[in-house]
Image (cartoon, rainbow, N blue to C red):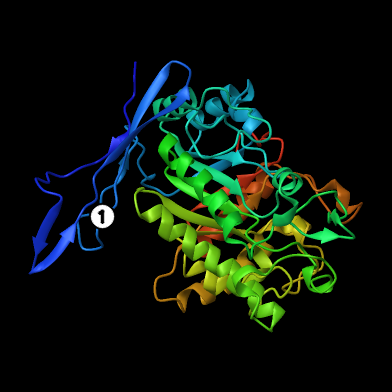
Amino acid sequence: MKRIRTYATAVCTAAAVLLAGDAVYAKEEQAKEVTYHPHITIPVVEKELAANMPRFYYDTGYDFTYPEDGVRGVYVTGHSAGGARLEELLKLTDKTDLNTMVIDIKDDFGNLTFKPPEDSDLPEIGKNMIDDPVTLMDTLEKHKIYPIARIVVFKDTVLAEQKPEWSYLQNGNIWKNGRGEAFVNPYLKEVWDYNVNIAKEAAKLGFKEIQFDYVRFPEGFETRDDSLEYSKGEYKEEKDNVQSRVTAVTDFVEYAREELQKGFDVDVAVDIFGYSATLKEAPGIGQNFSKISSNVDVISSMIYPSHWTPYFGIDKPDLHPYELTREYAKVENKVLEKLENPPTSRPWIQDFTASWLGNGNYQTYGVKEVEEQIKALNDSGIDEFLLWNATNRYTNGVDYTP
């Protein structure tokens, strides 16, 4: 069956409308065909409207509603979403109180996980693991799963290798970190638009939320910002490197949200290091928790106990999931309370075992450890969370509403 996506429209009998004596115009609609699947052709209508005209949203044809009791979700890779493991994850959500999937649309390497429409401006870049995104979205709707599209922004080895001028160079070669990962440059508007265009395609597919991850400069950038070769674009007049990074990252988030709000009924979320909430700003990576939070609908701090050094007076955080989560939540709540329009807090929590920490520094994470993190959030007035496991193998038997 052909599923139609169009902009929701109101009756308008003229291209020019007079409101309170002011002439307000709507440009002529331009329709184009978008093919997401060899056998499904989808008409799309693009329209610009003046600011004081009624807002028009792209209608995907799906009926995804925000979970009444809040989002409780799991991370899903492109491989899982497009492969056999999706069935396992569907069984997990069907039999538990989990209600959301955060699915990679652009992954940690920069792969676009689905093949873009033929007339899309997006290049067919990387590995397209989701062969049939329309069927995927149909399946999520059938199972009443709230869909969130994860887009890894500035960590992007694939794009950096294709567009070295959008990355950082060292002695004429693309700079990579110790794990062999390349980043693209947050100062460049071209990089912003590349990622925002991917977000728009995800919204057209039916995703109800766009979650931007790696919205930052590389870790430790403050130690190499003067040695690498890169453009500062419109920020070249900024003399303070720390503030120029913070401004560029914050500006991207604000720009992305504004662009998506022009025609799509989607929320915008950002993943952020948990420790950023405990600092005025993270100087190397350019993340200011308050400034980013002021420009999103959802803030998702990554607060895995295993990822903290001794903090909050807790010597070995991985051994104390409740205490670590509770102490973090206290800090975040204080920061968000100061904002005029605070976003929804929806932290990433740990459902994996961090054996790399070494004997005595980690424990096996199972039902008890996952539930302790959820309880700590609930005790702190935070009702939403996302579970992270890089392999998408989640603990069975967890009560997600303790």
Q: Secondary structure at mark 1?
A: loop
In the image, residue 38 above or below residue 56 = above
- Give the residue at x 40% y 32%: 144
Residue kind at label 1, given as amino acid type: Leu
Q: In this rendering, would 34 be left or right of 222?
A: left
Question: Would residue 325 be visible to someone looking at this image?
Answer: yes
Kindly identify the residue that appears in the image at 9 percent across and 61 percent down: 18
Residue at the location (75% across, 71% down)? Answer: 311
Tell me where residue 283 appears, x and y as whole percent: 71, 75
| Circle 1 residue | 49
Count of residue discs: 1
Residue 271, image x and y in percent? 59, 57
Count neighbours of disc 1 (C-alpha within 10 A) and say few if under 14, some if 14 to 19, many if 20 or more.
Answer: some
Q: Is residue 217 left or right of residue 43?
A: right
- In the rendered image, residue 4, in percent from the top left (x then y), is placed at 31, 27
* Quadrant of the snapshot with the N terminus: top left
The answer, for residue 297, to whether it is visible in the render is no
Question: Could you say which quadrant of the image residue 87 lies in?
Answer: top right
Residue 341: image quadrant is bottom left
Q: Residue at x 77, y 64 (%)?
A: 219
User: Percent position (x, y) of residue 277?
Assistant: 61, 71
Q: Quadrant of residue 28?
A: top left
